[in-house]
Image: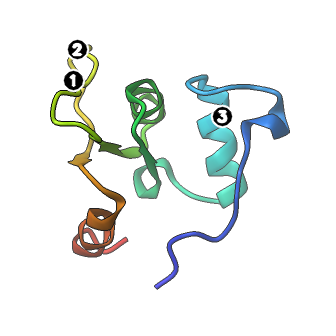
Amino acid sequence: MVFFKDIVSGHEIKSFKPGQAVYHHFMERANAEASASWLISSNPFDVLGSMASGMNAAWIKRDDGSLFDPWGERPTVTITSLLELHSILEKRDC
């Protein structure tokens, strides 16, 4: 099972996250549908930006005291370590 095939950067389009253009650029480069795409980040702004583009998002909650931004949105999944990611993606048949 391959999880990572390439690196896509907002630098290519001279934009930054959480701008929607960055997530759309990723989907175009990856030839992927938003609903089948995942962003993994410990930054709530990045999680919210990707979800606003229709992507799935895993928020890495590095500290028990960390709070997700109170915007009313919740990440697809919350994990505390990248070690948890494999089993979650495997269960979702990604």
Q: Is residue 92 left or right of residue 6?
A: left
Q: How far apart, in angstroms, are the residues tagged by discs 1 and 3?
A: 25 Å
For the image shown, how many numbered marks are present on the structure?
A: 3
x, y percentage for residue 4? 57, 69
Q: Nearer the viewer, residue 73 or 36?
A: 73
Above or below for 12 versus 19: below
Q: Nearer the viewer, residue 38 or 85?
A: 85
Mark 3 highlights which residue?
22
Residue displayed at 73% across by 44% down: 9
Question: Is the C terminus in the top left, top right, bottom left or bottom right quadrant?
Answer: bottom left
Badge number at residue 67 = 1
Q: Is residue 13 left or right of residue 35?
A: right
Q: Residue furthest top?
A: 71
Q: How far apart, in angstroms, are the residues tagged by discs 1 and 2?
A: 8 Å
Does the residue at mark 2 contact the one at mark 3 (Cβ under 8 Å)?
Answer: no
Which type of secondary structure does the marked residue at label 2 adopt? loop
Amino acid type, callout 2: Pro
Whichever of labels 2 and 3 marks the residue nearer the N terminus, that label is 3
Comparing labels 2 and 3, the label whose residue is closer to the camera: 2
Q: Quadrant of residue 23?
A: top right
Amino acid type, callout 3: Val
Q: Residue furthest bottom?
A: 1
Badge number at residue 70 = 2
Residue displayed at 36% across by 44% down: 57
Whichever of labels 1 and 3 marks the residue nearer the N terminus, that label is 3
Residue displayed at 68% across by 26% down: 16
Q: Quadrant of residue 13?
A: top right
Q: Nearer the viewer, residue 58 or 24?
A: 58
Q: How far apart, in angstroms, are the residues tagged by discs 2 and 3?
A: 23 Å
